[in-house]
Each structure stands twice: as structure tokens, then as C-alpha cells.
Image (cartoon, rainbow, N blue to C red):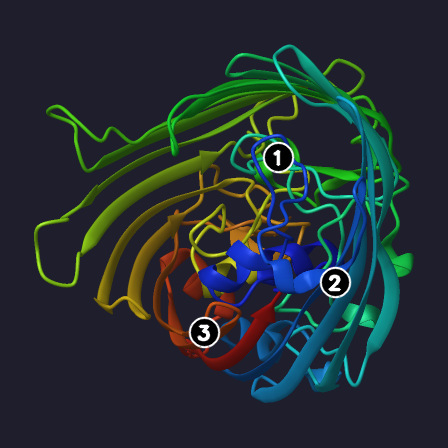
Amino acid sequence: MGTHRTLAKSAACVGLLACMFTAYAQDASGNTAQTDSRTVLWRTDNTTVNWHAEGGLNLVAEYNLFWDLSRVYDPQANFGPDTHWLEGYFKPGLSFVHESGNLDVYGMASVVGSFTRGTDAFDATNKGATTIESGYIGLRTQGADPTWDVSVGPRELLLGDGMLIATGGESGFERGALKFGPRKAWRHAAIARFKTGPGYLTAFRIAPNELKSNDGHNRLAGLDWRWDGKPGNFAGASYIHVLKSTSPYIQAAPEGIGPSTIIPGGRHGTKALNLYFQLTPTTGHLRNWLLSADLAVERNHRIDLRAWGGRVRVGYTFHDVHWTPSLTWTYQTFSGDNPNTRALERFDPLYYEGSPGNWASGSKSSMVFINTNVRSNELALAVNPTQRDSLTVRLARLDANQLNSPLQFGQATRLERLGSRLAVVNGVPYTHLSDDLLLEYVRIINPHVFLTLGASVSRPGKGVRALSQGQKTPDWHDAFATLFFTY
């Protein structure tokens, strides 16, 4: 079925807890939060310098990778469907704050070194790299509203809950640490925030930290307005404009018959509007419930792009029950290109947070199906036997929104008999793609060190099985053990 380098962000972050802590602690305005006095390196009356450190090791074993479809489509490549590898990273950094009245000068610098030993899921063997992560300086006011904050330089930026703008750096392939995905910061970032009351207005211009082997020279700008209520309650809207890009788009062949069309630089000029909200009431009839929704529309008049995507999430936490179980249902859907129209309806997920519990479509399947031409239903059950232990089970079903239309980047192009003739087709002939099951256990060893153990399986649906040309399509399994620390 093939892979693409940008899928590294879909495979990134082993374990939800690791993803929660891969960024340095930040408050709602994005400022680095200093919460541990032990990280103070130097302090005067007006200036504080802190050190930071984050890293981990991850041991992964995969069996029947990508449902062993490489055996069908490219047997000469000798792609090994079973593999195991060790990956890791270390991210040290320094931050400072200099206070002068109600005006602060602040900044941060950090690097990330990552590696893979063995051969990972995308056939990269013994890779690694050290790159700059953060390197920004900023000015901000303190005190009564309104306040403002301006910074320039590589840093993290997340809009809403990460549907489109979250992961600014790519890992895996020549950089190693495919599953961890430790790079989050944007390579270039100019960010200005204005706060009044519970509202934040953010203006930004960013460029992702892309792989040299797959650099799309992307540049983006936009605005985000966000209202923050009590913890866990927020609403907002983001506007994003792709100012420059050489990243291609792919379009379905007319009526789904024939090879798909590659549109060079298709992303250039794309505009997106994302509306989002989350509600977690603590009183009243909705107490203990979680309600959230996202909606995004995308347009690009140059290539007649008309795409959309969205998500609805409903959860309930049984606070009065032993182990405090919580049950969450998530439905998300992203438009695919309709082969019966001249317009391009294929959704572009941009730089989404593609980890379990965030915006991944499925668990194993998220390494194959990015958030385009796919919909998923997921049910997650989490329990906490102790304050230090948590266990989560995720079950997801994935379906295609458009048949005979690209699901990823044109993989599974093949010959099929249509009536009395052979024709080139793409995509899947049936909607059901896969069923994924993920079991994950997290142990908080201490406030800075976490252990995650997990296993998952993906069973191919009728749509994927139809690609095997009559050969057996096995289930895809994996297991992993992750040790993660952060200061």
C-alpha cells in the first residue's frame, strides 16, 4: 500500500501520556511555565535562568506491517513485514525571563537528538540526527488586562485542540525516533498575542521544520481567537492561509477510472477556517460530561479545492465509581475527492496532532490513513486503579468517505476488470477499511518519569482485503514499551 514521509507525524507519540509531556509545560497563552524550583540554574532579583530536559527510550515490535500488502504490490522490494527496533531522543534546553517593571524579556533555546537502532516501520535503518528545536526571544507585558506578547524564533504553536496546527517538526526517516515524534517546534515562527479578559487573539507566521528528503517549503500565516473559561472549557476560531508551498495534492481520476492526477504545489494558496469548542461542566445536569466539536472548511480557488472535516466527542467520567472509569466516543470525518466532480474535495490535514487520543484515525491504521477521505468511530475506556496507574482501551472502526478515490497519496493503484476490460483504478472498492484495538498501560514512576506498555492489532476491512488480489490479508500487530522523562 506504500507510505509517505509526512506520515511520520501520524505514527508519532507512543502513548498518550508521553504526548501530553513532550512539550515543555505551557499555560494557555503559550508561555513556558516554570513549576519546579530544582530547574533554576541562576537567579537574581530580576532575572531567572532555568534548565530543561526531556527524553525517552521506546522499544517497538511490529508484525505483518501494513497487513503485509507489500507482498502483493511489490514482492521484489523484499520489504520485511516483521521488524523490531529501539528508538530514543534527548531534548535539553535553557530558558530565561528578565523582569523590568511590567515588561518581561524572555526566551528559550533547545536542541533535540534522536536515533533509531534497527529497522523501523518505514524501512529506515539505524538513522539519527540532532537539530535545533527552540530558539526564540520575546517581549510581554504583565499585570492587568489588556496584555500583549510578541516572540520571534523557533518555538511551538498549537491552535485549538490540534486539528490543523500542532506539530511543527517532522521526525522519523533520516532523523530517527519515528514513533516518539519528538520535534514539535516550528522552524520559523513569529507570534503576537493580545489578551483581554478570557479572550486571546493570536497572529502568526510560521514555517515547519520539515525533513530534507521531503521539504515542501511551506509558509503559513493566520489568526486565532480563543476564549478560555474554567479549566477544560474553551472555544475559538482559526484562520490559516498557506502563503507558499511546493507540496503536491492528488486528485481522483474522472469516475474513479484511471490513474490519479498529481497537482504540483497544490497546497499553495489553500485557506482554512477551523471552529472549535470544548465543554467540561463541573456542576448541574451535565456534570462529569465532556462535550467537544470541531469543524474545518478549506478552499483554494486556484485549483477549485472545496474540502471539509470535523469531529464530535462525547465523554463521561464516573467520579463516584471505584477506579474512576471514563468512557469517550469520538466520531471524526474528513472529505475525500469525489471522482464524479471536477472540483477537488480532498481534505488537507496540514500539521495535525496525530497521536492516539488526539487526532489519530485509529491506532495502527493512522500510520497508513492520514486524515483525508476517511471517517472513524472510536470508543475509549480508561480506568485508574491507583493514582499512579492508568489503563486505556481504544476500539476504532475506519471507513472511506469516497470509493475509488485516493486515501493517502495514491497508493494501491492497480488494474481491475470492469466489465469486459481492464482499467487502472485507485482507492478502495468498499468503504470498510479496518478495525483497530489499542491497549495501553501507563505507570507514573515519579512526577518526572513515566512508563508506558502497550499492544495493538488492526484487522483489515473489506476495502483493504479487496486490494490483496485474492491472497490472504493478515492482521497487523504491534507491542511497545516506553520509558519517558521530563523536567
Q: In this view, does 50 lie to the left or right of 470?
A: right
Q: Are marks 1 and 3 in contact (CB under 8 Å)?
A: no
Of the numbered discs 2 and 3, the one sitting upstream in the chain is 2
- Residue 267 seen in this snapshot: yes
**Horizontal and vertical percent position of residue 423:** 62, 50
Q: Name the residue under label 1.
A: 164
Q: In which quarter of the image is residue 263?
A: top right
- Mark 1 residue crowding within 10 angstroms, few (<14) / some (14–19) / many (20+): many
Label 3, on which residue?
446
Q: Is mark 3 on a helix, strand or loop?
A: strand
Task: Assign the C terminus to one quadrant of the image.
Answer: bottom right
Q: How far apart are marks 1 and 3 (CA)?
A: 33 Å
Dot label at residue 171? 2
The structure residue drawn at horizontal position 62% and vertical position 58%, both measured from the top left corner, is 37
> In the image, 167: left or right of 13?
right
Above or below, comparing residue 163 to residue 421 in the picture: above
Nearer-the-camera pick, 448 or 468: 448
Distance (Cα) linking label 2 and label 3? 27 Å
Q: Where is residue 218 in the image (x, y as percent from the top left)?
A: 85, 37
In the image, taking residue 125 as reference, residue 9 lies left or right, namely left
Name the kind of residue labelled 2 in the image. Answer: Ser
Q: Nearer the viewer, residue 7 or 313?
A: 313
Q: Position of residue 319 (x, y in %)?
A: 14, 49
Amino acid at pointer 3: Asn
Looking at this view, is 44 or 205 the one in front?
44
Q: Which amino acid does label 1 sit on?
A: Leu
What x and y, as percent, mark residue 220?
81, 28
> Farthest residue toward the front?
45
